[in-house]
């Protein structure tokens, strides 16, 4: 049974580089304004990125979340339930924060901007006040942290974190979010998921070995 402190130590391949990146983001925010960061990222578009990032961003979608939960049923019911409940909880908290802050997305925030803004052709740019925090980022980080938690080799956490970061960057690259939005989404997901896993996975009823069964006929037959 893992406590919260134990999980923090155990998940260091994910959490340590993530914390270092958070410090870097904090430094950037001290030095540069929201507008400066946005327009710098907006200047970094390139043809391959315009193709790659719209696909990458889908790894933080609800379709991906449901798909991952279903696939984990073939690994173990326990893994699937941990993933599903973590996603539901982090998404709920994230949605409540969106409603609370009512923050405009970049397309709304810069509606009267005279400087040119590049938008990826044929990609819908959202125009509402649900920018903060980023839901796709929260979803991607939740999935990444749970996968690190259930994967025996914790060094895979580096890979999962990289994928989550690419999803977060894709939201800025596509002008759907600001740096503050994706940073907050990642924090919400990481904190909520870490606390939830440490508490829920230690419930006595959930330690029943039967939760380790799966839909895999080979594994069940064994």
Image (cartoon, grey):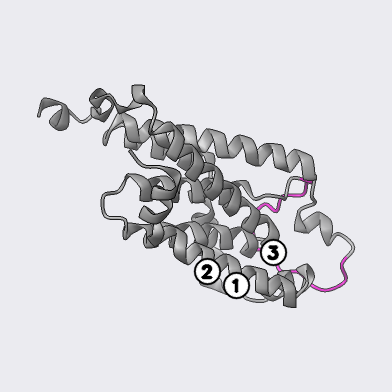
Q: Tell me: 96 left or right of 108.
A: left
Q: Name the foreground residue: 202 vs 155.
A: 202
Reading the image, the residue beneath label 3 is 119
Q: Which residues are magenta?
A: 113-129
In this rendering, does residue 178 appear at all?
no
Disc 3 from disc 2: Cα separation: 30 Å
The residue carrying pointer 1 sits among few (fewer than 14), some (14 to 19) or many (20 or more) residues within 10 Å by Cα, namely few
Q: Which quarter of the figure is the C terminus placed in?
A: top left
Q: Earlier in the sequence, mark 3 or mark 2?
A: 2
For residue 145, say whether it is visible.
yes
Q: Nearer the viewer, residue 106 or 82?
A: 82
Which numbered marker is on residue 117?
Answer: none
Q: Which residue is mark 2?
A: 20
Residue 58, given in percent of the width and then of the height, sits at: 51, 50
At x 36%, y 47%, the residue is 149
**Residue 128 highlighted magenta (yes or no):** yes
Comparing 42 with 189, the one in front is 189
Instruction: Give how far across and how far down residue 73 sits, in percent.
Output: 31, 31
């Amino acid at each position: 049974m893992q406590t919260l402190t134990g999980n923090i130590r155990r998940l260091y391949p994910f959490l340590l580089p993530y914390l270092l990146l958070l410090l870097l983001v904090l430094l950037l925010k001290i030095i540069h304004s929201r507008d400066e960061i946005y327009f710098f990222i907006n200047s970094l578009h390139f043809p391959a990125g315009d193709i790659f990032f719209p696909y990458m961003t889908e790894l933080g979608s609800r379709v991906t979340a449901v798909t991952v939960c279903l696939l984990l049923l073939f690994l173990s019911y326990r893994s699937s339930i941990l993933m599903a409940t973590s996603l539901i909880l982090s998404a709920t908290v994230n949605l409540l924060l969106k409603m609370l802050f009512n923050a405009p997305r970049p397309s709304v925030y810069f509606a009267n901007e005279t400087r040119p803004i590049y938008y990826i052709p044929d990609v819908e740019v959202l125009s509402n006040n649900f920018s903060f925090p980023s839901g796709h980022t929260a979803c991607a980080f939740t999935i990444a942290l749970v996968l690190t938690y259930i994967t025996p080799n914790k060094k895979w956490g580096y890979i999962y974190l990289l994928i989550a970061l690419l999803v977060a960057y894709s939201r800025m690259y596509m002008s759907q979010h600001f740096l503050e939005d994706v940073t907050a989404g990642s924090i919400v997901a990481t904190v909520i998921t870490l606390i939830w896993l440490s508490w829920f996975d230690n419930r006595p009823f959930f330690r029943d070995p039967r939760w380790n069964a799966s839909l895999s006929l080979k594994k069940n037959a064994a």
